[in-house]
Image (cartoon, helix red, strand yellow):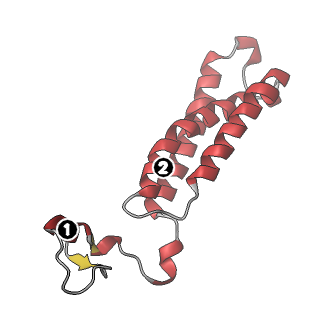
Amino acid sequence: LKSCKLKSRIPHGAHVHASTLVRTRLPCARLVQGPLKNMVDAFLLIFVLVIIGAAFFANVKVLMYYQQPEDSGFGSSIFCKGIIVFSLTLAWMLNILLPVDVRNSRPRPGVIDMKVVWTTAFFTLAAFVVLVVPAA
């Protein structure tokens, strides 16, 4: 990849070590200019949506496999089965937040505020553990 030289804050004529100059270069493909610079990474969005879909499908299959024969289908106790599927999907999502956080922070900080995402995820998990699952 070609490199784009960033504007340096080093005064003209100052003596600079060669490693500093290496750190001031980024691949051109990673520099986004204009109105697209605040967009969410397309790979990140597709990755998260595919994982959510796969998690939901896998959790429904797990529920169908482990349910009692007299509770077959979704007709009986649909609320409890929905809580089970959503709880398992939430567990998957907490595991997938780490790669999302890494992808969002590199090579440049993304537009997603991961501190808010992590806080929301853990509060949602706590609400499920303390309130929702025991009530179901």
Residue ranking furthest to the front: 14
- The image shows residue 129 at horizontal and vertical percentages of 73, 26
Residue 82 appearing in the image: no
Label 1 CA crowd tier, 10 Å (few <14, some 14–19, many 20+): few
In terms of image quadrants, where is residue 90?
Answer: top right
Q: Which label belongs to residue 113?
A: none
- The residue at 49%/63% (across/down) is 110
Left or right: where does residue 7 sit relative to residue 55?
left
Give percent across and percent down for residue 101.
48, 50
Q: Position of residue 115 (x, y in %)?
A: 59, 50
Q: Which residue is drawn at 43% across and 59% down?
A: 43
Amino acid carrying label 2: it is: Val
- Badge 2 local density, few (<14 within 10 Å), some, or many (20+)? some
Q: Name which residue lies at 70% across and 12% down.
A: 68
Q: Name the residue under label 1.
A: 22
Viewer-proximal residue among 117 and 133: 117
Type of residue at label 1? Answer: Val
Question: Which residue is the site of mark 2?
Answer: 100
Q: Is residue 125 left or right of residue 115?
A: right
Q: Quadrant of the N terminus?
A: bottom left
* Distance between mark 2 and mark 1 Cα atoms: 27 Å
Give the mark nearer the N terminus: 2 vs 1: 1
